[in-house]
Image: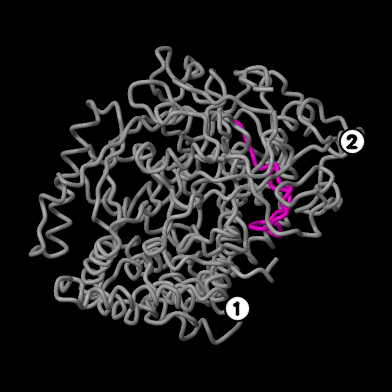
Amino acid sequence: MKKFILSLFIAIFVLPVQANEGMWFLMHIERLNYRDMQKMGLQLTPEEIYSINNSSIKDAIVQFNRGCTAEIISDKGLVLTNHHCGYSQIAELSTAENDYLTNGYWAANHKEELKPKSLSVRFFVRMDDVSKRILSKVNDKMTELEREAAINKEIALIEQENNEGGKYTVSVKSFYEGNEFYYFVYQDYNDVRLVGTPPASIGKFGGDTDNWEWPRHTGDFSLFRVYADKDGNPAEYSEDNVPLKPKHHLTTSIKGFEENDFAMILGYPGRTNRWMPAGGIEQNVEYAYPAWVEASKTSMDVMKDYMDRDQQVKLDYASSYASIANYWKNRQGMIDALKHHKTAETKRETEAKFQKWASKKANKKYANVIPTINDYYAKTNEASSHNNYLGLLLRTRMATLPYRLGSAIEYYIDQNDAKRAELKPKLETEMNNLYDGLYLPLERDVLAAQFKLYSTKAKNIAPLIAEIAKEANKTEDGWKEYLNNALQNSIFESKEKLQGFMANPDAEVLKNDPLYQLSVDLLKRYRYKSEEETQLGHDFDRAFRLMVQGMREQNPDEKYYPDANSTLRLTYGKVISLPEDKRNDANKNYYTTLKGTVAKYQPGDDEFDMPKELIDLYEKRDFGQYADKDGYLPVNFLTDNDITGGNSGSPVLNGKGELIGLAFDGNIEAMAGDVIFDDQLQRTINVDIRYVLFIIDKLAGATHLIDEMTIAE
């Protein structure tokens, strides 16, 4: 499919927004989007999607554990999200003896539903515009620090005014690079339990090979349940808690759909950078992302070696590995797409037009914006490379554990006996959490590989690391040898060793601990900014804010949507194919089938194995009520909705607001999508809800879960 040329937009702030582009606020749907949505097939009113006073679809959409999206699909608080969104909780609940991640799990009743240590869902209550109020507190004469202080003071007041005595979580967020502000009111539920998950051979079918690729055949889903106290209020875990009766739950449709049918997605997209200047794109492509890719692969290679040897290690590190692998492929895809489609050059053309507009006397406040932005990127290119190498190094647990615990221990040592008694339980809990599932040989070798990479590739590195590297880099295993010696002489080598130290803590011993010194050095370097860097950052922040403000003034008649920042958004489009692909057995290239899944089957392969029971169902063509009208069992399908990370688990809804699928990925052809939208090839890859229900019902036999859903046939 790479032979098809991407028809990129010049930028969202120059050409008209297309019908399928945009991540829209729910409160603006009626004014900005409703007519377009009606023409495309929406049969709901804006009030049925977003209402403050009445039940609406927004009440069924939750943010899942602060990173994904999920939806309520029954009146008993049943939650549907992606398998990869629940991955870390499923892995945490698994052991080598009861390996739910590998083999799947289905609770037969509420008592069998499993509580992870920490898992929450966040319901969206309402939002409002507070731009005028906040911006009235600032002026152009303020420094960036003064401006930030004034804004933060007003934000604190707004959050306090709207939390109703702590009942709600209130978050004020900046949009359009500080030109607008909105507050969001949420209610959090912390008792969320695992109900069911397919085996990894379904939920992660295709593994890293198929990640970001089409055609896909992945059953990327899992089920959880929200619990509350007897009055329906949020409550910490208790056996007395009951399943939540939600304000709204989605109806699930098994009627199917056709190409060009309306498709709407609600969710919590994490981050887009559609306003990013050309210099930022070039910096990412040439400096930041290559460092991330190289450092990610370094960790992955070491981790996989240990994970392949031991099933418990594989479970303990499954989530960490999956996260690194996902972004490793994402960042490489971004590099390739942005280079191939010359996105930076496209942005340069837009900036040149803006500069010409800004040079006019009436627009002189914007005259130095682009030069200031370009100067910032030119002077921070090497730093961006360094920060990505260091950032991946710091994802190694033993790189930060000594600092996190050591800082707390330093404070503990300085206190009197009464204060120590108060602090000790919290310290012990933190200690247990940080050492839980830690496998020292893996940690040591990942850290050694990362230290070697960092000390040979990054510039202006942490001082202590630079000093050690003079000897450690002389031999292939120099860093391993150094770390072996450091571990033997460190109180942080094991939880037991640290507990022994805590029986008689000594500040000097802690201060001179080799791992503590390494960890402190790394974190100190990570947080360090010179006066020049600080000033560059302030100048850039002001210039970027003015650039966005100016570009909106330059084109005042356009429809705008803000970059994603983990706030609830709606995107709409249609079910649509990609160009024909011989790898897909389906009649049209907007869906895949179980036949195609079986065709990829490789017995014993870590990525393409399949449960025998699933193959048996296929061979018998025992698809139940979940088969398409043409006889095949659908697996995945495509829409042209505008999504990004954080939308994982988002519901795909038809024109009636019924659930037809579950978003879980994007396609490699449009990997530049976080920066610039492509209306021809940008796609959302979704699990067909009929495949989800088929797995629950026919494969797992968990028919009781189907029975509690509202099904539209």
Residue 616: assigned label = 2
Identify which amino acid the numbered label 2 is placed on.
Asp
Q: Give the SS element for disc 2.
A: helix
Q: Is residue 276 left or right of residue 455?
A: left
Which residue is located at x 79 percent, y 27 percent?
A: 698
Does the magenta-highlighted stretch encompass residue 217?
yes
* Residue 89: % across, % down: 56, 39
For disc 1, the neighbor class at 10 Å (few under 14, some 14 to 19, many from 20) is some
Q: CA distance from mark 2 to mark 1?
A: 50 Å
* Residue 647: % across, % down: 51, 46
Which residue is located at x 42 percent, y 38 percent?
A: 34
Q: Quadrant of the C terminus?
A: top right
> Residue farthest to the left?
141
**Where does label 1 land, which residue?**
477
For disc 2, the neighbor class at 10 Å (few under 14, some 14 to 19, many from 20) is few
Give the mark, 2 or 1, whose residue is nearer the N terminus.
1
Q: Is residue 524 left or right of residue 651?
A: left
Residue 444 in view of the camera: yes
Q: Nearer the viewer, residue 241 or 494?
A: 241
* Residue 314: % across, % down: 66, 51
Does the magenta-highlighted stretch encompass residue 222?
yes
Residue 489 in view of the camera: no
> Residue farthest to the right?
620
Q: Nearer the viewer, mark 2 or mark 1?
A: 2
Contact check, label 2 and label 1, Cβ < 8 Å: no
Which span is picked out in magenta?
203-223
Q: Quadrant of residue 448?
A: bottom right
Above or below, 602 against 192 in this view is below
* Residue 55: % across, % down: 42, 21
Magenta segment's dominant SS is loop
Q: Quadrant of the N terminus?
A: bottom right
